[in-house]
Amino acid sequence: MAKIYKSINLDSSGGGSSTPPYGQSFSIATWSSSGSVYEIDILEATHEQGANVIVQVFELVSGVYREVELDIIASPAGNVTIEVSLSPDLRFAGKIVIKGE
């Protein structure tokens, strides 16, 4: 999967929720393998943004966060999973931002 980049201001709150967005940095070691993918899971109890969420994922490139497009799964309960290919290994260090709608 090709990575598509765009710059974004990580400090903007946006969204319709009065709760501040959840943001969490992650490293390559954070990813866990599951079948043919690597994934990172964030439970709704962790991000506390509710079930209807907007998810943005950023890769850290030369000290700058760049938004990437990848597989994002948001369950009806609000749990969020991001996935990348296991082979080739497409893991990266970055940040995830989750905002309630």
Image: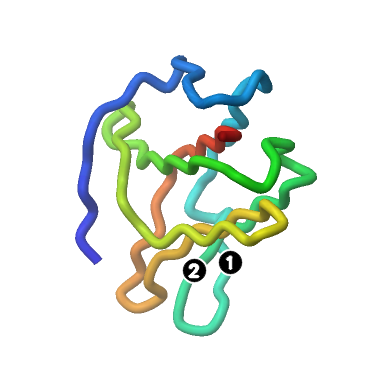
Q: Secondary structure at mark 2?
A: strand
How packed mark 1 is, by other alpha carbons closer than 10 Å (few <14, some 14-19, many 20 or more), is some
* Of pointers 2 and 1, the one earlier in the residue sequence: 1
Question: Who's the residue at 25% across and 28% down the image?
Answer: 7
Taking 90 as reference, is 62 above or below it?
A: above
The residue that mark 1 highlights is: 32
Question: Who's the residue at 36% across and 37% down the image?
Answer: 60
Question: Who's the residue at 34% across and 78% down the image?
Answer: 87
| Location of residue 75 by image quarter | bottom right
Residue 30 coordinates in the image, percent (x, y): 58, 54
Q: Quadrant of the C terminus?
A: top right
Name the amino acid, label 2.
Answer: Tyr
Determine whether label 2 and label 1 are within 8 Å by CB.
Answer: yes
Question: Is 43 on the left-hand or right-hand side of 35?
Answer: right
Taking 48 as reference, is 79 above or below it?
A: below
The residue that mark 2 highlights is: 38
